[in-house]
Image (cartoon, rainbow, N blue to C red):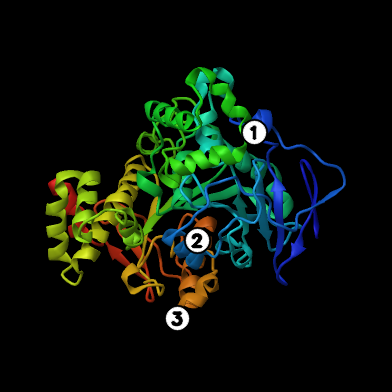
Amino acid sequence: MDVVVTTAGSVRGRAVTDRVWAFLGIPYGGPTGGGNRFRPAPPVEPWSGVRDALEYGPSCPQPVNEGPEAEMALAMFGGIPEPTISEDCLVLNVWTPDAEGGKRPVIVYFHGGGHAIGSASWPVYDGAALAARDVVVVTVNHRLGILGYLSLGHLLGEEYSASGACGILDLVDALTWVRDNIAAFGGDPENVTIAGESGGGSKVATLMAMPSADGLYRRAVIMSGWFGLEGATPDQAKAVTERALDLLDIAPEHADRVVGLPADQLVAASATMGGIASGLYPVVDGSVIPVQPLEAVRAGAARDVPLMIGSVRDEYSMFLPLMTMATTGPKDEAELAYLQAVFGDVVPGVLQSYGRSRPDLDPARLRVAVATDGHVRRPAIAFAEAQVAAGGEVRMYRFDFESPLDPSLGAAHGLDVPFFFDNPDTASATGFGSERAPLADEMAGAWVNFARSDSPTTGSGLPWPAYTVPERATVIFDITTVVERDPASAERLAWDSLG
């Protein structure tokens, strides 16, 4: 059972529990450094003999995540810095309860970190506990940031026409590998669920808009999809490329020089550009990605794909203070200015409405609530309702369990991930109470049940009704999990009435 034959060669895994085998660092694509940089990946290079798949493979070169945000990510996810780094990072990991036989549901998970940082090696993404629930779990490394999304076709010609989407094309290659190989690991290639949180949720939404991904998955899960789930327009991508080349001291007419630069110089430039906020996102070029994900879903591009989508209650409790940290002057004024710059003149009225409907919140938490809903919850609702209007089926959730890291964080961005993966002990040192195990059982069970069935329940068997308008049924995951009809409707309506 420790050796599995793939289309490129045999791999040797290892037993990680008495029920689950892990096969780590399996190549799904060829080298993406050197002359292959900024191009779609070549096929995986076959090997002879048996290849050890016992350790995680390399992560994509990326900016070092430092400062308060990094400390919080380390506490919550347990996963930085990356163990190994290489441009040749197209590897994936498989956890299976039985590598010999069976047709189990498959969950393919794309890590968070925007489109700029992260990897599948973070401990929170360990798939062993989930696989013990009789599913096959796959996590994926791929190109990120400047190596995955620098748009060069307008400068270097047709052979680089897809350079602004290489990172997302890597995920299509990973799903193709799953289609061709997962049966050998006990998985059902016709029952694949793609999932991701934050930037990973954005990747799922983008795949739902891509014709090249059609037929490679059956269901989709978007957890706290990042910043409206949108990609870069061609004009935005050209402006980002211009800035990158300027930082690298390369004139546009000599853009070909970027292909030969050391990867660390490229990563340093993307860090200067803002890392996660650099603008290096998948480019909606009209070809690889024909239209924005929301537009594609509204037009019915994924109407046959059952969708699970949701957010955490206080997504921006960590981000809003960080975004205004360098601003001089009072904190409340800086945060209000940020909200108005992003969302416009509706913000004062929305804040007043939130204050009436949630009188228990102080002004700082009210600003977090507005930022959360503006950036994440409202886009999630819009995406869900576009899918419903197109004839698709949707399950909506919200995660309300409060962080023990800091009382001011509440239910912070990313806190749901260890619970969906049934890895609550990842963060046990930070003070999770006795509630963490049953909540993880509830949420991991819900995820697995969704991957198994078009009529899912939570882990405890609580029925999860489809999201429809105007009922808007939503599962609220907390110490006690319930189903609510149109939760926080006053806040939702405030945006609609003032916008």
For badge 3, the amino acid type reads Gly
Q: Name the residue under label 1.
A: 41
The residue under the point 63% across, 29% down is 260
Q: Name the residue under label 3.
A: 433
Q: Name the residue under label 2.
A: 447
Spatial CA span between label 1 and label 2: 31 Å
- Per the image, label 1 sits on a secondary structure element best described as loop
Foreground of the two, 370 or 419: 370
Position in image of residue 440 (x %, y %): 49, 71
For badge 2, the amino acid type reads Trp
Work out whether 399 lies above or below 110. below
Left or right: where 477 falls relative to 363: right
How would you rate the neighbour count of disc 1 (Cα within 10 Å): few for under 14, some for 14-19, many for 20 or more? Answer: many
Q: Are marks 1 and 3 in contact (CB under 8 Å)?
A: no
Work out whether 236 lies above or below 333. above
First along the sequence among labels 3 and 2 = 3
First along the sequence among labels 1 and 2 = 1
The residue under the point 75% across, 54% down is 53
* Residue that extends furthest to the right in the rendered view of this protein: 49
Foreground of the two, 174 or 395: 174
For badge 1, the amino acid type reads Ala
- Per the image, label 2 sits on a secondary structure element best described as helix
Left or right: where 317 falls relative to 263: left
Q: In which quarter of the image is residue 102?
A: bottom right
Quarter of the picture containing the N terminus is: bottom right
The residue under the point 55% across, 69% down is 423
Position in image of residue 405 (x %, y %): 41, 72
* Numbered disc in front, either 1 or 2: 1
The residue under the point 60% across, 62% down is 126
